[in-house]
Image: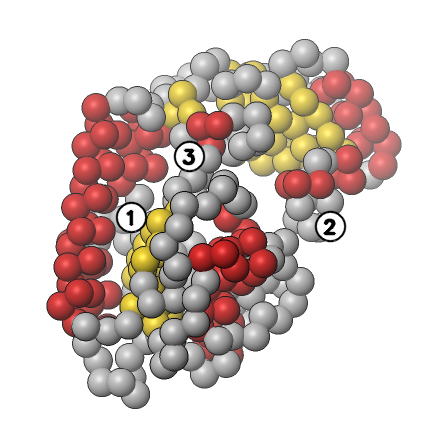
């Protein structure tokens, strides 16, 4: 995580709004001395049903100790999609498991009678993988970090950047950018953690380093540009006292942060890529409602 970033649970805790995390990226790590008031160390083997029960138990706490921002995460569909592909029977069964857990959570929330906003999101879609692309970098002083269809390439000096860039540009199966040339929609240009060069596999392929590895490659992958691959589009469902029922146009996930901050009455600190204005059409004021539960 970028050390300059402020996760939602951290923003809440800094402004004296109690937060809890039943798993979420980096929520079991201390960031600048702050953790959620309630949290669990990530364990992929932790039963799905027990995750829901833990969230409900936190919401049963006395009002003074009860969290007002809660995260809940399920990885079933992600694991199945990678291993078997997005169109597989295994992925369909995993989606059924997550759906049943959301139903269990919804029934539990209804029984509590609290003014809870339930927001269900996914961080990405999943695409069927078709082939692998070798980078073919013939240069020393280069470090490569690969994640599916993308490679971040770190070079020791300007000369190495220039030579590596020219090598990669010769590969017709790759799109290659200097960091400052990456599409503005990626929000990559100002982040110092992004590589000096960024390589993207074209089509539905993934990147396999200089040579394809002798392994079983994933059958499904994410990380493709959603403007080029509609399979990357995610879901957003919301219901609760601060949610105005409506069907809205597709939007970027970065706009969810300021939307939840507004529901919780939090002042956003620092620069955001998203804007609360995007989801204003579905926001409605609800006095004394400061509880949000989110699930993935």
For label 2, the crowd category at 10 Å Cα-Cα, with few meaning under 14, some 14 to 19 and many 20 or more, is few
Which residue is painted at 39% across and 42% down in the image? 235
Residue 205 visible in the picture: yes
**Above or below, comparing residue 199 to residue 250 in the picture:** above
Residue 191 image point, x, y percent: 69, 50
**Above or below, comparing residue 95 to residue 276 in the picture:** above
Mark 1 secondary-structure assignment: loop
Q: Which mark is residue 74?
A: 1
Residue 166 image point, x, y percent: 80, 20
Q: Which residue is mark 3?
A: 125
- Hey, which quadrant is residue 94 in on the image? top left
Between the residue at mark 1 and the residue at mark 2, the CA separation in whole angstroms equals 31 Å
Q: Which mark is residue 190?
A: 2
- Hey, which quadrant is residue 271 in on the image? bottom right
Which residue is painted at 77% across and 25% down in the image? 165
Foreground tag (1 vs 3): 3
Query: Is residue 246 left or right of 262 when viewed as pictured?
Result: left
**Above or below, comparing residue 180 to residue 126 in the picture:** below
Which is more N-terminal, label 3 or label 2? Answer: 3
Badges 1 and 3: C-beta atoms under 8 Å apart?
A: no
């Amino acid at each position: 995580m970028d050390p300059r970033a402020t996760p939602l649970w951290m923003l809440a805790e800094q402004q004296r709004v109690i937060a809890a995390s039943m798993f979420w990226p980096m929520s079991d790590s201390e960031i600048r001395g702050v953790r959620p008031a309630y949290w669990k160390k990530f364990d992929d083997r932790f039963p799905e049903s027990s995750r829901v029960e833990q969230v409900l138990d936190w919401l049963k706490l006395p009002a003074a100790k009860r969290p007002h921002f809660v995260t809940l995460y399920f990885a079933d569909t992600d694991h199945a999609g990678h291993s078997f592909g997005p169109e597989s029977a295994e992925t369909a069964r995993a989606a059924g498991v997550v759906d049943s857990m959301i139903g269990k959570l919804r029934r539990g929330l209804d029984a509590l009678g609290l003014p809870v906003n339930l927001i269900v999101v996914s961080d990405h879609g999943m695409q069927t993988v078709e082939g692998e692309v070798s980078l073919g970098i013939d240069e020393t002083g280069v470090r490569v970090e690969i994640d599916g269809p993308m490679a971040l390439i770190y070079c020791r000096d300007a000369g190495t950047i220039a030579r590596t860039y020219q090598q990669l540009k010769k590969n017709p199966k790759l799109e290659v950018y200097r960091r400052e040339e990456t599409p503005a929609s990626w929000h990559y240009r100002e982040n110092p953690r992004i590589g000096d060069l960024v390589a993207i596999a074209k089509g539905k392929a993934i990147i396999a380093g200089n040579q394809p590895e002798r392994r079983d490659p994933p059958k499904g992958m994410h990380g493709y540009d959603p403007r080029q691959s509609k399979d990357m589009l995610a879901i957003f469902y919301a219901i609760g006292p601060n949610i105005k029922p409506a069907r809205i146009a597709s939007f970027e996930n970065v706009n969810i942060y300021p939307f939840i901050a507004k529901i919780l009455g939090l002042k956003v600190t620092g620069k955001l890529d998203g804007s609360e204005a995007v989801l204003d059409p579905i926001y409605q004021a609800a006095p004394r409602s400061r509880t949000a539960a989110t699930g993935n």
